[in-house]
Amino acid sequence: MPLKTKENYLKSMYLIEEHVGTIAASELGKRLGVSVPTVNSMVKRLQDEGWVVYQKYKPIKLTNLGRKEAALIIRKHRIVEMFLVEKLNFGWEEVHEIAEEMEHIHSEALFERMDEVLGNPVFDPHGSPIPDRQGKIHLRHSLKLSEMKVGDKVKLRALLHSNSDFLMYLNNKKLELGAEITITHIESFDGSMTISYGEETSVTLSREVCERLFVEQLNV
Amino acid sequence: MPLKTKENYLKSMYLIEEHVGTIAASELGKRLGVSVPTVNSMVKRLQDEGWVVYQKYKPIKLTNLGRKEAALIIRKHRIVEMFLVEKLNFGWEEVHEIAEEMEHIHSEALFERMDEVLGNPVFDPHGSPIPDRQGKIHLRHSLKLSEMKVGDKVKLRALLHSNSDFLMYLNNKKLELGAEITITHIESFDGSMTISYGEETSVTLSREVCERLFVEQLNV
DNA sequence: ATATAAATTTAGATGATTCTAACTTTGTTG
DNA sequence: CAACAAAGTTAGAATCATCTAAATTTATAT
Ligand SMILES: [Mn+2]
Ligand SMILES: [Mn+2]
Ligand SMILES: [Mn+2]
Ligand SMILES: [Mn+2]
């Protein structure tokens, strides 16, 4: 079985598990762009090789082996994204598609060498954590801007769902990771927030956007 | 039609045409690690898409389109090899296998960015020429050490067939591209040469090796 | 709790790349 | 130039990832 296919299935399962909790065949099919019967037959084969546990009509479960393998692919993906942004001057909205292909290159040395010249970063350009060589994640940002109060000062640390539409929206607003944000107003009607940061003195973000911005609270 | 399959066929055909002159199905099969009937059926399909001309029992011919496409894949391969050696500290014997995979990444920008940070090199780490964006090769080294005379001084510029066995043999002899070589003796019996360069004062190379070293003659 | 909707599974098929075995054509050599 | 060797072609089949259509199971809503 082509390693690439296996790797893409495992990675998607890992991300679904992380973010939805349980892995449905329909969700996997949607993310991988294949039909549900295709998922079904692939999952059976992945079970034969010990990556997942499959039981009829039950959610798919990753084995520990499968989860570790998936984390290592995500490690490669995120190291590549960081390398492209830091060393090859790509924008954070340009790197995902390239990383999607490069994560399948069969060379441990390549990724370890990139990791090394980057200085072993712990987060990728979108603030997502980079798993270590054992597939473990040490740090992650989980406090959302939408949970903060008027007057709070926070630093933008990570994004939820870094699709390029969202990244280009943030580019337009000149809002980058590391920005120091002050919350000046919260509209109780719809939860939209008015904030200031850098040169921008009054920018209003919808609740939808605020829920996708992970922040770190600065000492008050 | 998986792009990767097509690209590997075209690249192999280009290299065979360059080294042998005419493209035999058996040679293609040997290089790609597939059977001759497999080559036969693939070549027919490549013809349908305009990359080659196929006639029963005749050597395979690349079209101009196919030749250009092949050159562009070789361009990517050689840029990657140069990048790995120059920017990620790989040895020249370690980079071919990685480049073999990376050349198939679907991003013009990635390769152009690597080319840019390298300063648009004209040769790869083995001295092979890097085709330009139009698939044209401007410079190439073709004078062999085996053609030189006793007393000649030359600079090592490129290798013929850079397989890793050969590269590691050269590593052991501390013989690198750019080395300034003086020919001190030629054994007429078998054509082996005794040369000096760098710290090495008397190294003997077989005729077989000398035929694989491209040099540039230094002003006499 | 029954009807309806949603999700999953099975069955059967397709296109891509590959193989081996058998056959045909071309090249070489005495 | 006839015989044999080498190279190339055809036939037929396997595997893999994928699909659609139909059947089955589980979940939801009156
Ligand atoms: Mn990504
Ligand atoms: Mn991928
Ligand atoms: Mn190479
Ligand atoms: Mn290749």
Image (spheres, coloured by chain):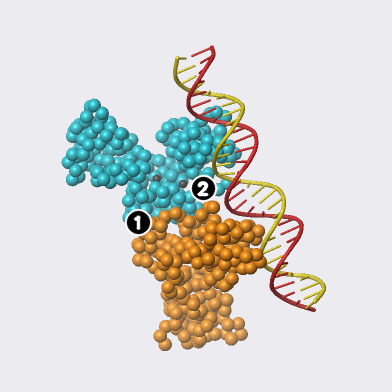
Chain colours: A cyan, B orange, C red, D yellow
Q: Position of residue B128 (x, y in %)?
A: 47, 70
What is the chain identity of the residue bearing mark 2? A
Q: Which residue is mark 2?
A: A4
What is the chain identity of the residue bearing mark 1? A
Q: Residue at x 51, y 47 (%)?
A: A4
For disc 2, does the CB lie below 8 Å from ligand 2?
Answer: yes
Element type where label 1 sits in the image: loop
- In terms of depth relative to the viewer, which is nearer, A33 or B113? A33
Number of residues whose C-alpha sits closer than 10 Å to that of mark 1, classed few (under 14), some (14–19) or many (20 or more)? some
Element type where label 2 sits in the image: helix
Q: Position of residue A62 (x, y in %)?
A: 51, 36
Q: Is residue A43 visible from the viewing direction of this image?
A: no
Going by the numbered disc 2, the residue's amino acid type is Lys
Q: Which mark is residue A88?
A: 1
Question: Does residue B144 appear to the left or right of B119 in the view shown?
Answer: right
Q: CA distance from mark 2 to mark 1?
A: 25 Å
Going by the numbered disc 1, the residue's amino acid type is Leu
Q: Is residue B88 above or below residue C12?
A: below
